[in-house]
Image: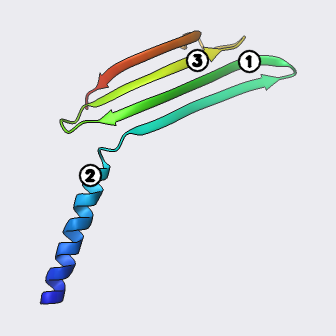
Amino acid sequence: LAKQALIGIRKAEADLLSAKGGFDPLIAMDASRKTFDGKNYYFYTNPEVKIPTWIGADIKAGIENNGGDLLARETTPGQTSYLGIEMP
C-alpha cells in the first residue's frame, strides 16, 4: 500500500512537470525554395516565436520573407512582420 502511494505521488509530480512544459516558448522556422534550370520559382522564409499564456491565448510574432518569379497569389511578396494574439 505504501509503494502504491509513492507511485501515485511520483505520477502526480510527472504530470505537474508535463503541464508546466506546455507554457514553454516555441521558436519555429518554415523555409522552402524551388529553383530549376537557373530560374528562381519561389522562396519562403518564415521564422516565428509563439509564447503560450495561462489564459489559453498565445502571443505570436514573426517575419515573412517571400519572393520569386512564380510566387503564389495568396502570398505577399517581400518582407512583412506580424505580432498578434491567437485565441482558441
Would residue 38 appear left or right of 25 to someone viewing this image?
right
Q: Where is residue 72 in the image (x, y as percent from the top left)?
A: 61, 15
The type of residue carrying mark 2 is Lys
Q: Where is residue 40 in the image (x, y as percent from the top left)?
A: 77, 17
Per the image, the residue denoted by label 3 is 65
Looking at the rendered image, the disc whose residue lies closer to the viewer, 3 or 1, is 3
The type of residue carrying mark 3 is Asn
Question: Distance from label 3 to label 2 (Cα)?
Answer: 33 Å
Q: Position of residue 2 (x, y in %)?
A: 13, 88
Quadrant for the N terminus in the image: bottom left
Q: What element carries label 3?
A: strand
Location of residue 7 (image quadrant): bottom left
Location of residue 87 (image quadrant): top left
Question: Distance from label 3 to label 1 (Cα)?
Answer: 14 Å
| Residue at image coords 67%, 21% | 43
Would residue 79 appear left or right of 82 to someone viewing this image?
right
Q: Earlier in the sequence, mark 1 or mark 2?
A: 2
Q: What element carries label 2?
A: helix
Per the rendering, the mark at residue 20 is 2
- Identify whether 32 is placed above or below 71: below
Q: Residues within 10 Å of mark 2 (few under 14, many from 20)?
A: few
Per the image, the residue denoted by label 1 is 41
The type of residue carrying mark 1 is Tyr
Looking at the rendered image, the disc whose residue lies closer to the viewer, 1 or 2, is 2
- Identify whether 59 is placed above or below 11: above
- Identify whether 11 is placed above or below 1: above
Would residue 9 appear left or right of 86 to someone viewing this image?
left
| Residue at image coords 52%, 28% | 47
